[in-house]
């Protein structure tokens, strides 16, 4: 074999090795690209789910499946039930609602800014979203359905009842109640065999104390706008909710309510992060 042939075959070897290396290299680059893409997807997924995971959740058994409650804060709650997402008083001061799934149903108890946030609603709604509100909120939310105290209607197979929410003793310096009678709503939603009462901003009114068959109750507990622990305990003793969540409680000492209801063996008082 002469030197020229050796050198040529060497050249062929080298160039074919180079082509293989180049192919492998571009394969590696596409693998890297894929890995990067997967990593970004994972980061996106984790950050989205951790945005929701930072909130406490409870699950309530009903005859038609579990009701999942997410405690956003203050008066803001989410109910997940039978594939539908229901938002109660969503306000962006409590959470970035642009990160949450679109709403099937939004309930607004009244027009105060810690309950009604038109921007948060706008971010949650799509063509199919149903919105229920009190009359005083209607001007700020196009397409909302007004319910008055005493009204009831069925939405997404759920029975919704609007009940009174108002002050009796807590008033502004000019003598007007913070929440005048007939303006705001509480809501009772029936999920399968369970009735869930979201009281809105109210005191322990005669109408509240006369409620029947409430499985889960959310009662507000902060002065001067709503109730003291004593008023919440008084109402709970009267209508006997099976589970009681004080909410909208600001800096109120929740241990006081637990003490006051210590003897009420049929009421499960649950404290969640709802300042
Ligand atoms: Zn409020």
Image (cartoon, rainbow, N blue to C red):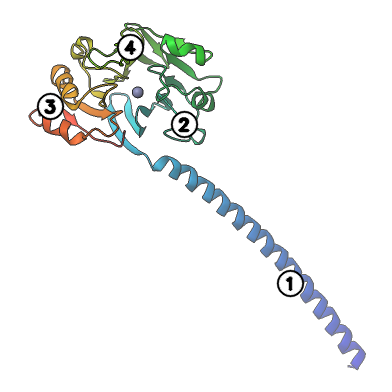
In this view, 147 is above or below 192: above
Label 3 with label 1: CB-CB less than 8 Å = no
Indicate which label's residue lies in the foreground, 2 or 4.
2
| Contact (Cβ within 8 Å) of mark 4 with mark 3 | no
Quarter of the image where one finds residue 66: top left
Which of disc 2 and disc 3 is earlier in sequence?
Answer: 2
For label 4, the residue is 161
Q: Disc 2 versus disc 1: distance between alpha carbons?
A: 54 Å
Q: Pinpoint residue 104: horizontal percent, then vertical percent.
A: 47, 22
Q: Which quadrant holds the C terminus?
A: top left
Picture disc at residue 266: 3
Which numbered disc flags the more N-terminal residue, 2 or 1? 1
Residue at 21% x, 27% y: name it.
243
Q: Which residue is mark 2?
A: 92
Element carrying mark 4:
strand
Tell me, for residue 21, which label it has, or none. 1
Indicate the secondary structure of the residue bearing disc 3: loop
């Amino acid at each position: 074999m002469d030197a020229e042939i050796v050198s040529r075959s060497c050249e062929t070897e080298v160039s074919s090795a180079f082509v293989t290396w180049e192919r492998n290299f571009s394969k590696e680059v596409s693998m890297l690209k894929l890995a990067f893409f997967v990593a970004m997807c994972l980061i996106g997924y984790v950050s989205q789910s951790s945005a929701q995971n930072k909130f406490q959740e409870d699950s309530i058994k009903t005859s038609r499946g579990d009701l999942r409650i997410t405690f956003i804060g203050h008066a803001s709650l989410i109910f997940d039930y039978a594939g539908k997402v229901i938002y109660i008083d969503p306000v962006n001061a409590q959470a970035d609602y642009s990160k949450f799934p679109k709403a099937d149903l939004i309930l607004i108890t009244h027009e105060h800014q810690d309950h009604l946030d038109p921007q948060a609603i706008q971010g949650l709604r799509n063509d199919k979203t149903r919105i229920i509100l009190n009359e005083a909120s209607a001007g700020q939310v196009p397409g909302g359905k007004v319910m008055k105290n005493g009204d009831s209607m069925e939405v997404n197979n759920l029975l919704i009842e609007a009940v009174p929410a108002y002050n009796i003793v807590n008033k502004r310096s000019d003598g007007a109640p913070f929440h005048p009678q007939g303006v705001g709503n509480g809501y009772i939603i029936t999920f399968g065999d369970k009735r869930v009462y979201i009281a809105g901003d109210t005191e322990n009114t005669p109408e509240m104390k006369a409620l029947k068959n409430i499985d889960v109750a959310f009662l507000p507990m902060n002065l001067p706008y709503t109730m003291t622990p004593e008023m919440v305990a008084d109402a709970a003793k009267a209508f006997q909710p099976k589970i009681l969540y004080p909410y909208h409680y600001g800096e109120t000492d929740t241990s006081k309510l637990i003490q006051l209801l210590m003897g009420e063996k049929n009421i499960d008082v649950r404290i969640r992060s709802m300042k």
